Image (tube, rainbow, N blue to C red):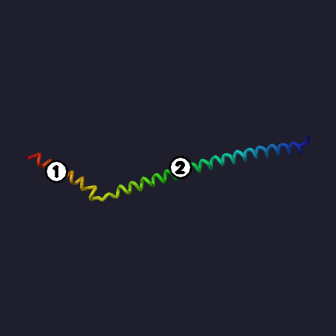
Amino acid sequence: MNTRDEEIIGLKNRINELEKQLDNLRLSRRVLMDLLEQIEKEKNMLSSQLQKRSKDFVRRKKIPTKKAYSSDFELYDFHDYLKNNLKK
């Protein structure tokens, strides 16, 4: 065998190695794209859950302040009434 044939065989081997590497890279890319897609779905799901919770929180927060505090004031008034009348 002459050096030219050896060079051709070496180059063919190198081409085969590079093709295998390319196949592995393509497979890795597919796996990474699938993972990225899964993460995006999870992110969107969590985002929608947070938006729903936020809307629920805002809806609950819309209780009129008079209504929210009136029972507290009534409780304090009742407490003061008991305090003053029990001392007598």
Residue 26's x, y, as percent?
69, 48
Q: Please say if the residues under marks 1 and 2 sit with CB atoms less than 8 Å apart.
A: no
Question: Distance between the Cα atoms at labels 1 and 2?
Answer: 54 Å
* Residue 54 image-quadrant placement: bottom left
Mark 1, other Cα within 10 Å: few <14 / some 14–19 / many ≥20:
few
Position of residue 9 in the picture relative to residue 54 (left or right):
right
Indicate left or right for 33 with 77 as reference. Answer: right
Q: Mark 2 Cα within 10 Å, few/some/many (few <14, many 20+)? A: few
The residue depicted at 16 percent of the width and 50 percent of the height is: 80
Judged from the image, the secondary structure of the residue bearing numbered disc 1 is helix
| Image mark for residue 21 | none
Q: Amino acid at mark 1?
A: Asp
Q: Nearer the viewer, residue 46 or 10?
A: 46
- Quarter of the rendering occupied by the N terminus: top right
Q: In front here: 40 or 22?
A: 40
Which mark is drawn over residue 42? 2
The spot of residue 30 in percent (x, y) is 65, 48
Taking the spot 66% from the left edge, 46% from the top edge, the residue there is 28
Labels 1 and 2: the sequence-earlier one:
2
Q: Amino acid at mark 2?
A: Glu
Q: Position of residue 18 (x, y in %)?
A: 76, 46
Secondary element under disc 2, as helix, strand or loop, is helix
Image point (49%, 53%), residue name: 47
Give the residue at mark 1.
80
Considering depth in this image, is 45 or 7 the residue closer to the camera?
A: 45
Seen from this angle, which residue lies furthest top? 1
Residue 9 to residue 55: above or below: above
Residue 67 placed where, x, y %? 27, 57
Determine the residue located farthest toward the left in the rendered image: 88
